[in-house]
């Protein structure tokens, strides 16, 4: 899938849409999810134009990929959720219902998070 420069996270990165920033480094930006599903719900996105983890790890240099995942961990530390625990999740593609086609990792925390995934009946 080609990257759409007008997706909502690209617009946040350009400053066209506001966000509640939690943390950023050279390669990543972390901000609060607009529709939080847990008391703490933060998104971490690479600053570069990548649709998916496949796209990101294929197209980006290794230091950018590494810097992104360091930013995910640092964001969790700054949120103060490391001791109680947290969950990271990335929806990628159709079967995962990825809504925004700019690669992102969710950080969920702030209460017991229940089973890892809903079981299908
Ligand atoms: P996903 O289904 O993994 O693609 O999740 C996309 C996430 O982006 C959802 O949790 C949305 O609530 C969140 N979201 C959409 N628009 C915004 C926005 N303008 N600011 C912050 N989060 C957003």
Image (cartoon, rainbow, N blue to C red):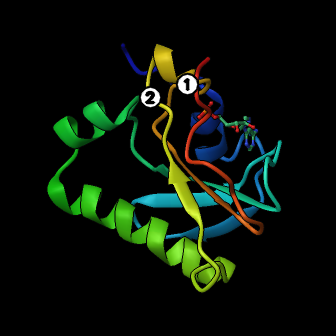
Q: Residue at x 51, y 24 (%)?
A: 96
Q: Quadrant of residue 108?
A: bottom right
| SS at badge 2 | loop
Q: What is the x, y in percent for residue 106?
A: 58, 50
Density class for disc 1 (Cα within 10 Å; few <14, some 14-19, many ≥20) is: some
Q: Residue furthest front?
A: 121
Mark 1 → mark 2, Cα distance in angstroms: 5 Å
Task: Give me the residue at 44% from left, 20% from top.
Answer: 93
Residue 118 spot, x, y in % from top left: 62, 33
Up the image or down, 117 lies above or below 110; here it is above
Q: Is residue 25 above or below residue 60?
A: below
Q: Secondary structure at mark 1?
A: loop
Identify the residue under disc 1: 98
Q: Can you give x and y, in whole percent of width and height, for residue 25 in the image?
A: 46, 70
| Residue 92 disc label | 2
In the picture, the quarter occupied by the N terminus is: top left
In this view, the residue in front, 92 or 61, is 92
Q: Nearest the camera: 17 or 118?
A: 118
Q: Quadrant of residue 21?
A: bottom right
Residue nearest the observer in this picture, 34 or 83 = 83
Residue labelled 2 has its Cβ within 8 Å of some atom of ligand 1:
no
Mark 1 near ligand 1 (CB under 8 Å)? yes
Residue 66 falls left or right of residue 38: left
Tag 1 near tag 2, CB within 8 Å: yes
At a point 50% along the width and 33% down the height, the residue shown is 91
Q: Tag count in the figure? A: 2
């Amino acid at each position: 899938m080609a990257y759409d420069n007008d997706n909502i996270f690209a617009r946040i990165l350009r400053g066209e849409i506001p966000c509640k920033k939690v943390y950023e480094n050279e390669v990543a930006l972390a901000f609060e999810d607009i529709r939080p599903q847990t008391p703490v719900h933060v998104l971490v996105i690479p600053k570069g134009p990548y649709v998916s983890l496949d796209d990101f790890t294929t197209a980006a240099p290794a230091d950018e990929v590494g810097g992104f995942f360091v930013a995910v961990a640092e964001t969790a530390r700054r949120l103060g959720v490391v001791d109680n625990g947290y969950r990271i999740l990335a929806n990628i593609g159709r079967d995962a219902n990825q809504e925004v086609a700019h690669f992102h990792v969710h950080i969920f925390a702030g209460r017991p998070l229940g089973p890892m995934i809903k079981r299908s009946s």
